[in-house]
Structure formats: C-alpha cells, structure tokens
Image: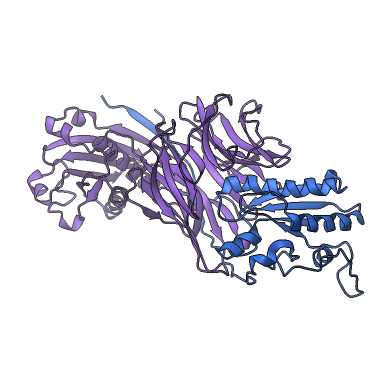
Amino acid sequence: MPHGFLIKAGSMVAALVILAACADEPPATDASDAGSGGATQTAAPAPAPAPAPKVVTQPSGPKDGSQEHFVLNVGDRVFFAFDSHELNRDAQDVLRRQAAYLARFPSKRIVLEGHADERGTREYNLGLGERRANAAKEYLASLGIAPSRVTTISYGKERPIALGHNESAWAQNRRSVTVISN
Amino acid sequence: MKLLNAATLVMLCLGALAATLSPAAAQLRIDITSASVDPLPVAVTDLHGETATTRELGREIAEVVRGNLSRTSIFRLINPAAYLESPEDVLVRPNFTNWRPLDAQALATGSVRIESDGQLRTEFRLWDVFGASQLTGLVFRTTPENARRIGHIISDAIYKRLTGEEGYFDTRIVYVAESGPPDRRVKRLAIMDQDSANHRYLTDGSNLVLTPRFSPTQQVVTYMSYVGNQPRVYLYDIDTGQQEILGEFPGMTYAPRFSPDGEKVVISMARDGNSDVYVMDLRTRVTARLTRHLAIDTSPSFAPDGDRLTFNSDRSGTQQIYTMAADGSDVQRISFGEGRYATPVWSPRGDLIAFTKLLNRRFYIGVIRPDGTGERILTESFLDEGPTWSPNGRVLMFFRQIPGDDNGRGGSVRLWSVDLTGQNLREVATPIDASDPAWSPLTPLEE
C-alpha cells in the first residue's frame, strides 16, 4: 500500500562572502603589569601608571573629561582573578580614582564592559563578565557614582585585549573597562 | 549566488516491491551502539538516466549518498570503480553473483528521469546482496533542484533500514562563521546542509551574534545578538530573513534554546550581575522565572519529554551540571567528577546529557546520564566546546579551537563531529572559521 509524503523545501540562497582582515596587534605585556594598568582600547595594559589621582591637563593634550584623558590620567580598567569577580586592592584603587574623576563630571555617563578570559565556556563567561562589570558598578556606587549614570555590558570571552594563550594574556583579559559615554 | 525556488517533493514507497522480506534480509542489520562493530560494506551505484542531464543528476544523487555513508563509522563504501555491473544493468534487479565477490552486503540502485512537466522522478531500491532480496524501495517526485535533498532522504532510508534507527542526513547546521583578528572578531550566522553543501550566511556581521539554536518545529533559529550594544536573544525566520527580539527584558538575555514542542524558549537573564534561568511562552509572551539564586545559572536545555531541564550553575562554587523540573522545582546536581562542567545539552533520545568539561586547562566533550551516572569523555583538546546532538542522538558536533601565536595569528576554530562511541572524530567543512554549531531536527515530511 503506497503512501505519500509532501515535503516543503524552503528557498535556498547561497551567498559567499569572505571577510578578510589582517591582524594588527600590540604585543602582550607581563601579567604583573596588569594590576592597575591604564590603556587604550587598542593597546595592551601599560605598566602601572602614577598612583596619585593627579590630573594633568596640557594645552595640546586630550580634553579633560574625554575617554583619552581618563585613560591617561586615571586608568580605565581593573583586573580579576580566574573565575572571580572580587575587586582586589589594586582594582579598588583604580575605581576610587575613577570615582573621583567622574565626580568632576556629574553629567557624564559611563559604560562598564565586563570581560572574561578564554578558559571558560561562552555562555558562562557572559554571566561572568556581567558579574565583573556589576562588581565595578557597585563599588563605584559606594563611592557616590549614581547607578543611574552607569550601564553595564558583558562581552564574555568575545573581545580579548591580549591575544596570547598564556597566563599573562588571560590576566589582561579578565577585566572590567570603564568607558565614558557622555 | 544561486536562488532555488521552493519546491514540493512527493515521496512514495515502492510498496509491493518492499512488501516481503526474506529471513536473511531481516538479519542484515547493524548494531550502532557498539564501538567495536565492523563497518558494513555497501555499494551505491549511480542512478541510471537515459539522457546526459539525468545521468548527471543520477550521479550527483549517488555522490551525496556515498558521501553521507562514508562519513559514518558504521558503513564502508565499496569504491564504484570496482563495480562489475552498470547502473543500467541493475535497473530491474541486480545479478547478485556480481556483487558478492566485492563483499557488498547492501546495494543501493535506482534511476532518474525528467517527466513532461519538468519534475524529476527518482526511483531508489536497497538490496540485500547475500539474501538476494529487496530491502526497501522509494519513488520521489520533485524539481531537479532538489536532487541533493533526494540523496539525503535516500541516505536516511538506507540508515534506517540497516540500523533500525532514524538517520540524520536530511538535516542542516546553523552556526557562527568567524573572521578577523581575535580582538575584533566578526561573527555571522550561517547555515548549511549537514554535509556542508548549500552554505549561506544569514547575517551580515555588523552585529556580534552567538549561540544559534534551531526550532524543533519551524524554520526558526533563536540566537543572541549585540544589536545596538544591547545583548539580547532574538528569533530569526530562515525562510523570510525576518529578525525579532525575544521579549522586553531589563538586562542581558542569552543562552537561548527551544522547548521540544517549539512553543517556548528558555534563556538566561542577567540582572544586577546575577544570571537566572527564565522561560518564555512564544504565543502568550508570558515569562516565568525558573531559578532564583545568586549563582550564574545558564545554558538551560529541555529533556525531550519537556518535563525536566538541565542547566549550568556555579552555585556550589564552580560550574556544575544540574537538572530541575520544568517549573524550577526539584533541583538536582548531577556532575561530581574532577573539574568544571558546562553547556549541558539533553539528548533527543533522552538517555544522555552532553557537556563541555574543563580540567587542567584542557577542554573535553563528554556525556553523562541524567541521574549523574555513566560519565564518559569523548574528545579532548586545547578547547572543545558546545556539543550539539544529531537528531537521532548518535553523533555530536562541537567546535574546536587551535590556539594561534601570542599575536593572535595562526589559530583556527572549526566544527568537528564525533560518534557517541567516541570514534569517528572528523572535521566538518566550513568556508571560514566556525563555532557554536546547532544541528537541526530531521526536515519534516508532511503527509
């Protein structure tokens, strides 16, 4: 007894686009430098900056209150231990400087970007990055930065800053980055 | 760029021919649960055609079948160059004495022709060589553009007839295609047949996308995207290309997966740094919270009966695998081995949960029974992550990263598959780097 089936085949569009991009990366620095580093979005954390929240404003330098100025004078990121969102003393120092800086610009809003290293699974690391960004947010709040000025976003392990596959690189990638967003 | 029109495919069993099975035929069956079974030697002739066009279509369909069978560990394809009979010779009935010397246990034959309305008519028969009998026979009517699909349906028919289980060849893979340097990775949703044919990109790479998963009932994918720097779960209609955000949530939503009936999506939502599991009914858009814990609760996956879920949580201090009832009650931890356990995915058969394990800086793909017993490790590398089940629960696909140098050069990430036995580890071809594979269900047949 034959029986029949109907199969609906969807329309198929095949398009092939290869996005090529060249690697253009800064060298990784040693993890021991990573504790309180100031760095831009495209450079690995530099050696520890001056500890005092001293603000340097030069006529030709970055504008006071800009992200670049913030990075140079305060440091935009804090680092975490493996699978941890605890803020160590170095991290608390950086956040205190950030709070003092941000207090001078009460109209500025910030985004806290939480990141994880590659030694975790993708989905869990999204949760971990969220935790880290939130830890920074809560600490800033305790220093008087209103949570209403702050948004958080987790990138999990999707946006490493150091590209190696070693302890030094991982230490730099476990971070929360403060971005002034106006 | 190639555009295929939607087509209807009609399949008929060659009922009269398949009606009687000899006792010998009934014995031609492979046990696919054993790791040490010898592969079954099979021969697949080109399907006979009277014209150059149909001969080419017949060859293409046979090549699809041969490719599918040869990528399994349970069949051994006999090289067509050794065949003593032509596709025309075997059209009505093979001379089995010409196939026994090749040790062919099963022989697939058939024919194709274009009918007056332009439809492709394909006949397929599977023979038991030593039993000298027909095991199954099918007739298909469809447009010639569906030739590859006919090959997959024939492959599934062979698999089912010889193993007693459903196949997984008429299926697709949705995954994330990757390009660019590691710190500025461009990620796009892409879809292809399970044999890597008919590849196409679904998104253009302007937004970071992660973790696509198929609906079990519709041509819909759920995934995570950073549209507008708001990481949220989305739905993507494969046929129309329409994208839609899943609900209005005050925080990041991620780790989406459909329920077995396709009517719900289970996700994680992060709020104030804490991630919990939620489920949303797609029709009513009503959301229910399933976990309430300060831990990261994520990677939820339903059992095929929908009664329980498995999920990942670090509530014990490190990532472990748990199960719970569909309403969030009766939480049970099931992973107790050394290391961290992540990405649990319930098998479509219900009998196992696949996972990623992290131990001593190595990543593993493994399986464990839902009651926590019987843990088995199947693969190991620098990074193996994110298993997805073939719809028959016999094969796992995952992604494997090979690390590059300290400047991020020279690394790769690719899709791999492995049998549930731990054997038959092989790379799945993709045009560029690839991660986060998700296997579709068998493409549905509508009576």
A137 left or right, relative to B50: right
Choose between B401 and B111: the one closer to the eye: B401
Choose between B32 and B147: the one closer to the eye: B32
The number of callouts visible is 0
B77 left or right, relative to A75: left
Residue B418 in picture, x, y percent from top left: 37, 48
Residue drawn at 29 percent across, 42 percent down: B122
**Residue B208 visible in the snapshot:** yes
The residue positioned farthest toward the bottom in the image shown: A60
Residue B15 in picture, x, y percent from top left: 23, 29
Residue drawn at 9 percent across, 50 percent down: B101
Supply the letter of whichever chain is purple.
B
Residue B224 in picture, x, y percent from top left: 61, 45
B339 left or right, relative to A141: left
Residue B30 in picture, x, y percent from top left: 23, 38
User: What colour denotes chain A?
Assistant: blue
Query: If the image is split into quadrants, where does the C terminus of chain B sit?
Result: top left
The residue positioned farthest toward the left in the image shown: B97
The image quadrant of residue A29 is: bottom right
